């Protein structure tokens, strides 16, 4: 039986972020709908042709999206909340983008088609959240009571036909109904998922019927919920759903795809479904292959996810062949694929001409991953000799990665070996540290501060980009940054903030800024990965042992502290956040890479203290989002994450106050771990939940100090003094007055100055009112 190659999805944004440019031009009114749609069609055509040209047998379609594939699914089934004023019929671009981004101004009613008068609209975007444990965000589907579903977008069929016209028979991709419902939310109590599913299945059946009529053979149906902790009810829903779909479209062969983890205790439920194929993530869960081979019925086609769709490392092809050859010899039909959609990897390594040649030789982006899969398939179908060259290259790269001095730094391993338990503990407990810190800081009750960054204005971004291009000299750039910093420090003093920050104007990004100064990190020029909609990030590549050649922030801190008598916070990004927002090496455990980073940041903490810093903030914005998908794996992660934080923070004297900051978190289920971090002060995002999140801290009897955000920095809105006073009162109802700090929810880098000034002046007034009332 011939081994074939599939990709489960390809990045949409384009090798030069063409889709981003087209979307943003369209949104700003600089181009029209036709221009946007033609760029999109061109990108799809190029992507299909490229994959087919590389030798992919199952080229995906409908993996493309103008914004998000979960939103596409909501549009497909007509799950559009009432506030968007959609009247049924095909979901048009206006409705689609209103759900994606909110809409303000004149509604065009492009969807209704008959000249009804224009109405002013002001609707918020649908809620957005992270797609499993990735940094990709999807739009949360919303269901209401009496929710009906109807086929409202034929995108999947249209794109199948579009590719077919180009001469490529694709395998359309659908988000499976059970995962779709699981990702959604309903505002109505008692809205049963079984009823929703029963209403939804006819739409899926209709879609499959239309795809069959259009000529589709295989259809990929993604049910990544199969790697989560599921209930018996979930298993029953899956059984009901797939029985219905198998019956509805007997001509279609469904490839049920699971990714981001092991099927584990869902395996039997998955193997019982009437589908033609099953995809397994063998990067996250390699051990499941043997179990599945033993239990799956012989005619079930297995799609093996053997190259990493979540990371950038080149595969060791010979080692993979050793593993795959016996599987193929057993006679089962095998498809080779990346572990998950390639959506989460950059597109093409060939664009990275400036990367260190050794580092480059260890990497594979989406295009290179496809080449690896094709090489593997050739070897399995025709013998290794036919692809001897590529196999040799892959082995050489793997060997060089095992031994390269660019990766393996003896000094780092020696230092790790010398780490003692005591290094992860402050000399004294919080109760003893507290008076020492209060003594040297002399702060009022309800001390005021901010989270670190101040507006990254057009001028700041322009100066950075000019400096990057070489048109602004080092000296001029430095002078510019000093002036911005000085102005910001003076302004904070003038409005009466108690603990100041330098503003972070010199930082491009809270992780990149540190990665660029640490050994062991590399950066790409075009390695963009979609985060949401048109927004992309370029994650650093953590490829080697991490160390800090020299101080990274001390000069800026000293300059800023020299401008004021008030305490200036040292401002650092913590090791867990650096790790969670990077592509991390896969040749050592994540915990170890984190520990190395912790030691490097610890050096900076100690140097800041030595330079005179009395308060040092270590941001762990991404600590919670690193939680594993399965509950059973949480404790292990939290143990090493907290240990890394403590290792970072514990090199200083008891009188030095350690702050940490976390945004967009639920704290209830990780509060014990937060307590174990043993920070002296934690600032958290609480304005949007109106202090509800503080409940977890109160129930836990959190001993240390807390700055619950009283000002939601995600919108330009300026909160009034009374509003923040009320929030402070709500906080006081839950915590002791002497535990509380007053600060915004997060950094202010995305805000503009006028609203920032007005809001912080109000915030200081609210703190003063709280002091007066105490
Ligand atoms: N110190 C950072 C800032 O203020 C924290 C950002 C974050 O938590 N995402 O920008
Ligand atoms: Zn934050």
Image (cartoon, rainbow, N blue to C red):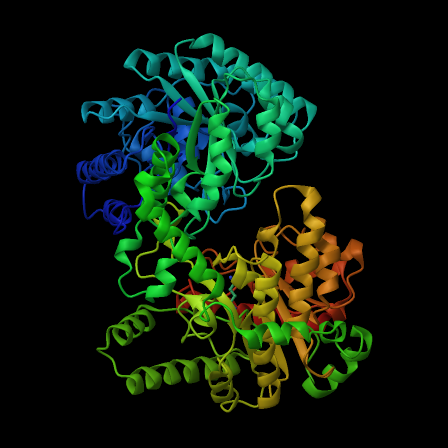
Tell whether 756 sits left or right of 119. Answer: right
x and y percent of residue 429 in the render?
A: 80, 74
Which quadrant holds the C terminus? bottom right
Tell me if I can see residue 419 in this picture.
yes
Which quadrant holds the N terminus? top left
Q: Nearer the viewer, residue 412 or 505?
A: 412
Tell whether 94 sits left or right of 331. Answer: left
Q: In this view, does 38 lie above or below 355?
A: above
x and y percent of residue 142 in the render?
A: 51, 31
Tell whether 461 sits left or right of 428. Answer: left
Q: Is residue 202 above or below residue 34?
A: above
Count of residue discs: 0
Residue at 62 percent of width and 50 percent of height? 627
Q: Which of 147 and 661 is in front in this view?
A: 661
Tell me if I can see residue 126 in this picture.
no
x and y percent of residue 204 in the render?
A: 44, 17
Residue at 53 percent of width and 87 percent of height? 561
x and y percent of residue 32 in the render?
A: 19, 40
* Image-quadrant location for residue 415: bottom right
Tell whether 154 sits left or right of 189. Answer: left
Q: In this view, does 318 lie above or below 563?
A: above
Q: In this view, does 419 lie above or below 100?
A: below
Residue at 82 percent of width and 79 percent of height? 432
Q: Nearer the viewer, residue 369 or 583?
A: 369
* Image-quadrant location for residue 68: top left
């Amino acid at each position: 039986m011939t081994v074939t190659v599939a990709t489960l999805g390809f990045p949409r944004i384009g090798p030069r972020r063409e889709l981003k440019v087209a979307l943003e031009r369209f949104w700003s009114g600089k181009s029209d709908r036709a221009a946007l749609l033609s760029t999109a069609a061109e990108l799809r055509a190029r992507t299909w042709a490229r994959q087919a040209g590389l030798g992919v047998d199952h080229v995906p379609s409908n993996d493309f999206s103008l914004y998000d594939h979960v939103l596409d699914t909501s549009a497909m089934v007509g799950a559009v909340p009432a506030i968007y004023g959609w009247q049924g019929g095909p979901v048009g671009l206006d409705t689609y983008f209103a759900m994606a981004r909110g809409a303000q101004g004149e509604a065009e009613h492009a969807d209704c088609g008959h000249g009804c008068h224009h109405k002013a609209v002001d609707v918020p975007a649908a809620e957005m959240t992270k797609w499993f444990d990735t940094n990709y965000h999807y739009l949360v589907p919303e269901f209401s009571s009496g929710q009906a579903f109807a086929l409202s977008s034929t995108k999947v069929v249209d794109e199948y036909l579009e590719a077919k016209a180009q001469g490529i028979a694709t395998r359309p991709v659908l988000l499976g109904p059970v995962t779709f419902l699981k990702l959604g939310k309903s505002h109505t109590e008692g809205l049963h998922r079984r009823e929703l599913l029963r209403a939804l299945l006819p739409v899926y059946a209709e879609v499959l019927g239309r795809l069959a009529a259009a000529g589709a053979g295989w259809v990929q149906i993604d049910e990544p919920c199969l790697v989560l902790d599921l209930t018996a009810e979930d298993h029953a829903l899956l059984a009901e759903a797939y029985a219905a779909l198998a019956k509805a479209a007997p001509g279609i062969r469904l490839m049920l795809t699971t990714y981001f983890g092991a099927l584990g205790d869902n395996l039997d439920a998955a193997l019982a479904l009437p589908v033609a194929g099953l995809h397994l993530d063998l990067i996250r869960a390699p051990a499941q292959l043997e179990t599945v081979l033993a239990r799956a019925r012989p005619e079930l086609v297995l799609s093996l996810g053997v190259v990493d769709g979540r990371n950038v490392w080149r595969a060791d092809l010979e080692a993979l062949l050793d593993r795959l050859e016996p599987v193929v010899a057993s006679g089962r039909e095998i498809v080779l694929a990346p572990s998950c959609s390639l959506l989460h990897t950059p597109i093409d390594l060939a664009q990275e001409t400036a990367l260190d040649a050794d580092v480059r030789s260890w990497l594979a982006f989406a295009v290179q991953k496809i080449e690896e899969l094709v090489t593997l398939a050739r070897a399995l179908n025709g013998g290794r000799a036919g692809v001897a060259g590529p196999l040799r290259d892959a082995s050489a790269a793997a060997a060089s990665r095992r031994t390269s001095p660019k990766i393996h730094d003896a000094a780092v391993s020696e230092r790790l070996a010398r780490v003692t338990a005591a290094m992860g503990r402050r000399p004294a407990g919080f109760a003893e540290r507290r008076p020492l810190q209060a003594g040297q800081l002399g702060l009022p009750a309800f001390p005021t501060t901010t989270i670190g960054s101040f507006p990254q204005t057009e001028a700041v971004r322009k100066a950075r980009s000019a400096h990057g291009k070489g048109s602004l000299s080092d000296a001029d750039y430095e002078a510019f940054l000093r002036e911005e910093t000085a102005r910001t420090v003076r302004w904070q003093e003038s409005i009466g903030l108690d603990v100041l920050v330098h503003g972070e104007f010199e930082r491009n990004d809270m992780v990149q800024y540190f990665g660029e100064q640490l050994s062991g990190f590399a950066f790409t020029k075009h390695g963009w990965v979609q985060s949401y909609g048109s927004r992309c990030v370029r994650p650093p590549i953590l490829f080697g042992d991490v160390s800090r050649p020299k101080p990274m922030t001390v000069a800026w801190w000293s300059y800023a502290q020299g401008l004021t008598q008030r305490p200036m916070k040292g401002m650092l990004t913590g090791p867990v956040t650096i790790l969670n927002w990077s592509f991390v090496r896969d040749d050592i455990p994540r915990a170890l890479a984190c520990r190395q980073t912790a030691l490097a940041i610890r050096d900076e903490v100690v140097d800041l203290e030595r330079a005179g810093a009395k308060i040092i903030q270590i941001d762990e914005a991404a600590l919670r989002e690193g939680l594993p998908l399965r509950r059973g794996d949480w404790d292990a992660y939290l143990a090493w994450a907290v240990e890394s934080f403590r290792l970072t923070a514990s090199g200083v004297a008891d009188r030095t106050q350690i702050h940490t900051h976390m945004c967009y978190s639920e704290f209830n289920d990780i509060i014990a771990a937060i307590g174990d971090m043993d920070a002296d002060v934690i600032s958290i995002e609480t304005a949007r939940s109106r202090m509800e999140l503080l409940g977890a801290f109160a129930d836990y009897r959190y001993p240390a100090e807390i700055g619950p955000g009283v000002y939601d920095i995600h919108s330009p809105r300026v909160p009034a003094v009374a509003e923040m006073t009320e929030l402070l009162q709500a906080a006081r109802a839950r915590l002791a007055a002497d535990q509380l700090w007053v600060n915004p929810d997060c950094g202010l880098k995305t805000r503009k100055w006028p609203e920032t000034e007005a809001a912080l002046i109000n915030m200081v007034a609210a703190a003063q009112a709280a002091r007066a009332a105490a």
